[in-house]
Amino acid sequence: LSLLRPLEIIYRYLTSSYRVLPDIIVLGEVRCGTTSLCQHLASLQPQQPHQQKQFMNCQTPFCLWSHPELDHKETFYFVGHYLGYVTPKHYTMCFPLKFTKWFMSIQYHIKNIIFGGGGGGGKRQQKRTPSFFTFDGCAQYLNSPTAPYLIAEAYRIHNQKPPILISCIRDPIQQTLSWWSYENNAMEWGESIGLTTWNTNLRSENYPPKSIQQALEFTNDKFVNEQYKYAEKYFTLDSLKDDHDCCSNSSGRVKLPHWAMTWPGGQLTGIGRNGKFSSNINRFEKVFHEA
């Protein structure tokens, strides 16, 4: 529990209908600079209103994990970290209140009146209001077979235009080596705190792979490919609109099945798919064009 924020999760869930959706979503890929980009976005804070500068007002997203690399960056909402629930209409729980956006607009309007007097040489300064925006930066979205449908549905439900979608890419070989190192370090950390049992029903007996070569073979084997194909069909826009039984319960909450978290077959199944930037990007384009 020391890594989680259970009370804030409950509060945000209860107030989700009073919150905004992100203006920007950084989709990934993993190990492609999403953290650096999100840190830059988070740094776009308002300057003093009496300065003649165009300034932004970035409000960072909520992360359920209390971790310095994750805070103010990624919500993990559509990859199942909230007990598997990925209900599109509650995605707003991870972002600021609508009142906050309104209040900041009023606040800076007043400051502009106070500080927006004449500048040097008799020239009057241009009054500016900071552009309020918020973002989500989950690097696991781009390679996810289910995230595009869920994200598109969130904006359809709230009757909003699609957000700005950003994908970061790098040399696939360098990315693969970086991801392999990162995941193995994560597994070593998990084993150090007693997480030594692997759910082979979800990931098969071949997980975790012992080498990059085995990881690539695992990614492309029949078991993983069938799971990916099934996951791509599990959430479709039609099924989400119709509140289909396969993805919703009687309360209308949408839950990601265990076998599809975070990616079908386990984290390292992304090894052979992360470098397929074109197909992963095309999946998002296709879904949002159909939304």
Image (tube, grey):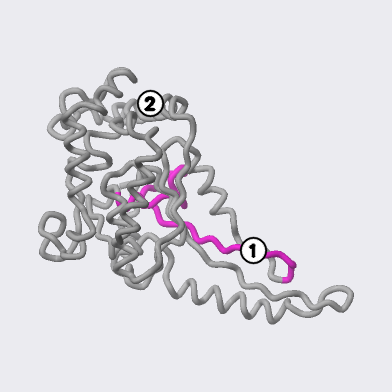
Q: CA distance from mark 1 to mark 2?
A: 39 Å
Q: Which residues are magenta?
A: 50-78
Q: Residue at x 29, y 68 (%)?
A: 157
Q: Is residue 244 above or below residue 220?
A: below
- In screen coordinates, is 126 left or right of 258? right
- In screen coordinates, is 23 left or right of 252? right
For the stretch drawn in magenta, the main secondary structure is loop
Residue at the spot of label 1: 55
| Neighbours of disc 1 within 10 Å: few (<14), some (14-19), many (20+) | some
Residue 150 magenta-drawn?
no
Nearer to me, 199 or 127: 127
Nearer to me, 64 or 42: 42
Residue 199 spot, x, y in % from top left: 16, 32
Q: Which mark is residue 228?
A: none
Please, what is the three-letter code of the amino acid marked with disc 1? Phe
Residue 229 spot, x, y in % from top left: 20, 40
Residue at the spot of label 2: 180
Please, what is the three-letter code of the amino acid marked with disc 2? Trp
Q: Residue furthest right?
A: 121
- Quadrant of the image containing the C terminus: bottom left
Q: Is residue 217 above or below residue 18?
A: above
